[in-house]
Image (spheres, grey):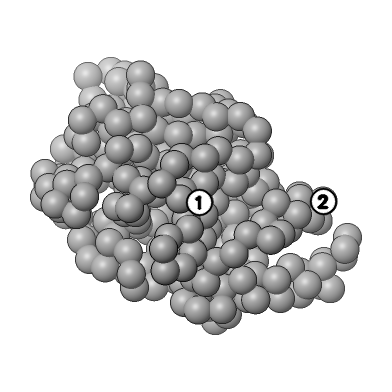
Amino acid sequence: MPCFMCRTCGTEHDDTPEPPALCRICSDERQYVGWQGQSWTTHDALAATHCNRLEMDHALFGVGLTPAFAIPQRALHLPQAGVLWETTALVTDEAVAALKQRGGVARIAISHPHFYAAMARWSEALGGVPIFLHENDRAWVSRTSRWLEFWRGDTLDLGRGATLLRCPGHFAGSTVLHWQGPTGALLLAGDALHVAQDRRHVSFMYSVPNHVPARPALVRETQARLRGVPFDDVYGFTWGLNIIGGGRAAVDASFERYFEQVGGG
């Protein structure tokens, strides 16, 4: 039986003889069902028409898809910490070999359910590495795997300078990854802090495609969680959508701008 994959969000589901009536992630108010209605594909069908895009995104090696498919996130590799941040809908031997050549992957960490994609398939291809998801988002898992590890609380030390921080607003378990290296620090923001098109600010969104801002109380919680956390660069969810240099000041200014416009400060 195939693992059906939603064409709109790229999330792979458990094996079933027929596709589900709806993708739960896309029928949620934070996402949307495709304008032509719910449609499905499979990993094998996707592999016949697409390939992995493998290239550097500033200082980090990224894995995406070409041509574009579903939500256009790219995964980022932090070899110093052995972490693959986010996953994509397509897994190829070429991508797995490239990650191994660059130091390998010991664990996968994902920011929120919109980027669960083919996470179970990625874990298996990488040798059965654990996938760290926040417990608050457990209900959104569409394809089960014995490699899933649900963490609780607000911070999780992954070791080797990498720390997960829960920053709610987009999802209850929305997470960012902070990495402190010998020459600087960076923040992998997912959609918890959505890098703006000017690449000088971030926004705080309950729904990105449907343009619904996050609740002020949750943004204030995110602000408190990040207070005092140093970082120079902020990597957004897709290629080139990054703040390179001055990231800490840009995020602080964005909090101030949000509360001025939305209130609740």
Hey, which quadrant is residue 247 in on the image?
bottom right
Percent x, y of residue 97: 12, 47
Q: Secondary structure at mark 1?
A: strand
Closer to us: mark 1 or mark 2? Answer: 1
Residue closest to the far right: 264
Q: Which residue is mark 1?
A: 177
The first of marks 1 and 2 along the sequence is 1
Q: Label 1 vs label 2: CA separation? A: 21 Å
**Which mark identifies residue 167?**
none
Residue at the spot x=27%, y=42% of the render? 105
Kind of residue indicated by mark 1: Leu
Residue 100 vs 205, above or below: the answer is above
Residue at the spot x=22%, y=45% of the render? 104
Does the rendering let one see residue 125? Answer: yes
Q: Secondary structure at mark 2?
A: helix
Percent x, y of residue 140: 52, 31
Q: Crowdedness of circle 1 by 10 Å Cα count: few (<14), some, many (20+)?
A: many
Figure quadrant of the N terminus: top left
Asked whether 67 or 40 is in front, the reply is 67
Residue at the spot x=39%, y=56% of the render? 73
Hey, which quadrant is residue 106 in on the image?
top left
Percent x, y of residue 167: 65, 48
Hey, which quadrant is residue 82 in on the image?
top left
Q: Which residue is mark 2?
A: 217
| In this rendering, position of residue 206 left or right of residue 129 | right
Residue at the spot x=47%, y=55% of the render? 179
